[in-house]
């Protein structure tokens, strides 16, 4: 069947492993090969981050889709994609189970996919649910091994990007894959200075780290994130690195908080979901390794929240919280603990402290005159019955605080993108 000018979505996921590859890179290879057959890429490819707590993810639970216009037979396109996936996906790894889905742009499946995709970002989906949709709409697809990637493949096509950001991903020369990345650290700080806040999370100033260059053995050299294509390109021109093989700009749901479920929407809490919860601080403690915890009382019961060591200076905010403070916490729930991404201190509790009274003559603090005897100043012979009650000065103020860029999760919305008051930004 020859379809003139057919517009086709191709979604792909689960092609990489800890040993190499990256689904975004495989998608770029697919786009290049399809373009050689005369196909045209429409718009930006989409890099969609799904539920960040899913245990079988390799790194950031990202899936990719793109729209092409082609005069080729759909069977030919499927064969070409199959060939490229077979030669590049890390199929030897037990945890790599690729899936590719093909959906024509006018297929009514698209409407159903948006609901499925939203669930894939916030909830846990079974492979059967993906196979059911594929069957219902008779979607051409490629399934390798367990084919778990079909979940992400469908979701990456379907997600409604009601909020989005862009990421420019630069890739290494293939002969460099697996070796140490060469780049000039300073140039990334320079790029940030020139383009922030239109780009963000390139570097972490406080912790003096470049955060947009990965350490894993995949083909990515760096990724510049931002709001605006011109700012991405400006930053791209400034950074100095080893030779770049190719680059691609993706539209993404990164930095949107799309994974967070608001407390008004739920009746109970479950692990492997991410939430915004409101509650009152009832406990605070620290464990070895520098991990700081608070426990908050919420309508769902007591909830433990963690600021782990990698969140660095953010922990100092959590350390300064006291019993009675009302907070909103943002983060994913695993092992019955919210891993804090952000916190909104809604109301600081008034904490009363008692002090010995001051001598009205010499202005020094009085001392106890004995059990139930009140207070006195030995020198001036002044006396007072009561302690003075004072409000403890708090070392933090109300408002929003976030983890620094080095600890940011892909889906977390940095405060610089949020339209809220009283923001405390860690850059
Ligand atoms: P890659 O670069 O290969 O995409 P990754 O870190 O994004 O690496 P994957 O290797 O894709 O992780 O593994 C994630 C797997 O989890 C995929 O098979 C995907 O289909 C599946 N998955 C994603 N979201 C969900 C979800 N909400 N429920 C169940 N499975 C999911």
Image (cartoon, helix red, strand yellow):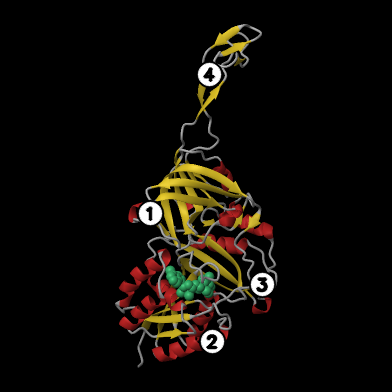
For this rendering, which residue is in front, 36 or 301? 301
Select label 4 or label 3 by which is in front. 4
Marks 4/2: CA–CA distance: 78 Å
Marks 4/3: CA–CA distance: 71 Å
For this rendering, which residue is in front, 107 or 61? 61
Q: What crowding class fits label 2: few (fewer than 14 Cα within 10 Å), some (14-19), or many (20 or more)? A: few
SS at badge 1: strand
Marks 2/1: CA–CA distance: 41 Å
Q: Position of residue 137 (x, y in %)?
A: 31, 82
Q: Residue at x 52, y 89 (%)?
A: 83
In the displayed orientation, state which residue is furthest to the top: 381
Q: Is residue 189 above or below residue 243?
A: above
Marks 3/2: CA–CA distance: 27 Å
Marks 1/3: CA–CA distance: 44 Å
For disc 4, the marked residue is 387
For disc 2, the marked residue is 86
> Is the CB–ligand 1 distance for label 2 below 8 Å?
no
Q: Is residue 83 above or below residue 117?
A: below
Q: What crowding class fits label 1: few (fewer than 14 Cα within 10 Å), some (14-19), or many (20 or more)? A: few
Judge left or right: residue 89 versus residue 113. right
């Amino acid at each position: 069947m020859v379809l003139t000018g057919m517009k086709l979505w191709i979604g792909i996921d689960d092609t990489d492993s800890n040993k190499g590859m990256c689904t975004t890179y495989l998608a770029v290879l697919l786009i290049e090969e399809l373009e050689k057959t005369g196909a045209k890429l429409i718009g930006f490819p989409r890099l969609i981050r799904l539920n960040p707590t899913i245990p079988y993810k390799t790194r950031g639970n990202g899936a990719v889709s793109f729209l092409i216009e082609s005069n080729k037979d759909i069977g030919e396109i499927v064969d070409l994609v199959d060939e490229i996936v077979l030669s590049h996906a890390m199929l030897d790894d037990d945890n790599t189970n690729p899936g590719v889905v093909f959906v024509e742009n006018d297929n009514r499946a698209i409407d159903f996919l948006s609901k499925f995709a939203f669930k894939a970002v916030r909830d846990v989906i079974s492979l059967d649910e993906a196979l059911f949709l594929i069957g219902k709409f008779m979607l051409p697809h490629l399934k390798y091994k367990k084919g778990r990637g079909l979940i992400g493949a469908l979701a990456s096509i379907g997600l409604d990007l009601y909020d989005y950001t862009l990421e420019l991903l630069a890739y290494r020369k293939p002969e460099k894959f697996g070796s140490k990345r060469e780049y000039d650290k300073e140039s990334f700080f320079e790029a940030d200075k020139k383009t922030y806040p239109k780009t963000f999370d390139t570097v972490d100033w406080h912790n003096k780290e470049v955060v947009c260059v990965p350490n894993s053995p995949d083909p990515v050299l760096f990724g510049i994130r931002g709001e605006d294509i011109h700012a991405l390109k400006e930053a791209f021109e400034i950074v100095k690195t080893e030779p770049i093989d190719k680059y691609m700009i993706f539209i993404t749901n990164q930095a949107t908080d799309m994974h967070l479920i608001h407390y008004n929407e739920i009746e109970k809490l479950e692990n492997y979901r991410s939430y915004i919860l409101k509650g009152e601080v009832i406990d605070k403690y620290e464990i070895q390794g520098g991990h700081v915890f608070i426990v908050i009382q919420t309508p769902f019961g007591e909830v433990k929240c963690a600021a782990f060591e990698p969140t660095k200076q953010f922990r100092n905010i959590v350390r300064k919280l006291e019993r009675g403070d009302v907070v909103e916490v943002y983060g994913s729930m695993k092992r019955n603990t919210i891993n804090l991404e952000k916190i909104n201190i809604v109301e600081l509790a008034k904490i009363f402290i008692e002090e010995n009274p001051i001598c009205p003559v010499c202005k020094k603090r009085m001392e106890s005159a004995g059990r139930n005897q009140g207070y006195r100043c030995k020198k001036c012979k002044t006396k007072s019955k009561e302690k003075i009650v004072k409000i403890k000065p708090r070392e933090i103020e109300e408002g929003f605080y976030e983890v620094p860029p080095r600890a940011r999760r892909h889906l977390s919305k940095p405060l610089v993108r949020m339209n809220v008051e009283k923001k405390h930004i860690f850059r």
